[in-house]
Image: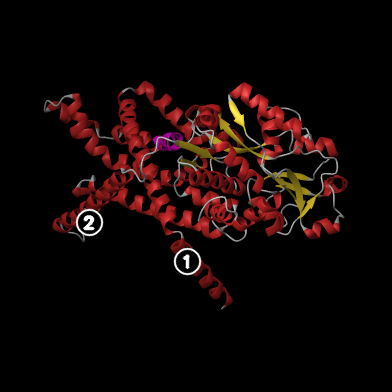
Amino acid sequence: MSLLKNLFIAISEFLLYLVDNKEQILSLLLEHIQLTTIAVGLSILIGVPLGILISYIKKLNKPVLGISSVIQAIPSMALLGLAIPLLGIGTLPAIIIVILYSLLPIIKNTYTGLSNINPQTIEAAKGIGLTKLQILFRVQIPLALPVIMAGVRISAVTAVGLMTMAAFIGAGGLGYLVFSGIRTVNNLQIFAGAIPACLLALIVDYLVALVEKLVTPISLQKSKDQTLHQVKKTRKHQKLILGVSAVLILILFGYSAIPKTTYNEKTITVGSKDYTEQLIVANLVSDMIESNTDISVNRRINLGGTQVCFGALKSGEIDLYIEYSGTAYGDTLKYPPSSDVEEVYHTVKKDFKDQFNIDVLKQMSFNNTYTLATTQEIAKNYNLKTISDLAKNAGDLRIGSTLEFQNRADGLPGLSSAYGLTFKDTIGIDGSPRYLALSNGDTEVVDAFATDGLLKKFDLVVLEDDKSFFPPYYAMPVIRDEILKEYPEVEPLLDELGSALTESVMTELNYKVDELQMEPDKVAKEFLIENGLIDA
């Protein structure tokens, strides 16, 4: 009985979430449909001709199918990471990656369908005087269409799932909800992205299956229990469904082409990394600029890690984002870790200007430095208060840390060297799942940021960095030089915002998103209004 009650409560909460966030979910669903439609459409335009080509030129068979198979074998996130430096962020790399992954089934099925046509049929076509081109379009392709459509069907359904990764680089789609939900441990948000994606995949599978049936000759579809009239009637219904679907897709593309806001020449593009604090701060910065100037802000938030955002800033795809002094000093500029706040800041400010023509504005008032954390129970059992205490017991403990922390000089490698840390096991877990692993007993220690709301949510013990290893990680706006010269009024606004964001304030704002499940944009706006930084 209690199970049914909990299930009813969970469903009720999910439905309430859908109602409260229906506009965002619908908008992301439409983006997902658009991206998937474009990717699959281009895959067909590329894949079918390639399949035809290799069926005629046999020497190209193995190279084309081999390259397609290799691409299919590369992990999608790895391929995306390789594409970002070449293609940047946004819809372009996402669509290209999905196209590459969709090609193999289409090419292979096109080749198979054409190759398996009875040679006597081809000879008969030649015998009645058809040219090679006429044979291809009037005989071979019609006969191979059912097999070709089977490949398209596989690619289309796969593309719906693959396109969720578009959110990783700011292209939108339902993946935004999934990634955001994972990072904030918000199951309702995860389901709000995953369930529509699953339903969309089923609908796509159904529609492509209808096309597959329509291109299959009636003689091959008619069963003993169906008359020819019944088959024709069914096909009319199928054509109607496909026609309505096609019209809806055209309306969707037409609607998306209509400008949603009045064009403003004065525009700044604000980006962010892919975790709670960054989403909040990006919205704080955006609201601060839009409410106090006549500048419009294009928000490209939730882009990924440091290198994605910094690469986008250098290439001009974004104009401004919030970086951390220690990250810029150690990860971007490759200096050895330093705990000198002023040295780190002024070095970053000078080098960013000299090397990249990027301005570093005044540091904000919160230091989101790295920390190590554990549960109350483990801290008590092992008498852990400092990282030096942890070093004495590390051989019995497992650490679950982000991949970035494991590969930075100011992260686990440098920390292990400074404290003599040798953990029983090191497990790479990105985002909030590492907190879940800790609470479930799968690990005993996690890396964290000093202002993480999840530290408060899970009531964790933060270990003191008694050797002052971790460098300062003060938040600081980094902006392209030409943008700052064009819009100098932005700097004093961000200075004012930075003064208001202390460590305790930032922790509380993160907690509202991570624990109270509030949306980052709402948390940001509420804070700015309460503190008189913008008008209600």
The stretch of residues the image draws in magenta is 90-103
Task: Answer left or right for 213 relative to 425.
Answer: left
Above-or-below relation of 110 to 15: above
Q: Residue at left 52%, top 57%? A: 189
Above-or-below relation of 430 to 461: above
Q: Is residue 94 visible?
A: no
Task: Answer left or right for 115 relative to 78.
Answer: left
Task: Answer left or right for 457 relative to 287.
Answer: right
Task: Answer left or right for 377 relative to 171.
Answer: right
Above-or-below relation of 272 to 191: above
Tell me which colouring the rendered structure shows. secondary structure
**Viewer-closest of 288 and 39:** 288
Question: Within the magenta stretch, is there residue 98?
Answer: yes
**Viewer-closest of 372 and 220:** 372
The residue carrying pointer 2 sits among few (fewer than 14), some (14 to 19) or many (20 or more) residues within 10 Å by Cα, namely: few
* Residue 526, picture quadrant: bottom right
| Circle 2 residue | 223
Instruction: Residue 28: give x, y in percent of width and height.
Output: 42, 50
| Circle 1 residue | 16
Look at the numbered disc 2 and give the secondary structure of its residue: loop
Q: Amino acid at mark 2?
A: Ser
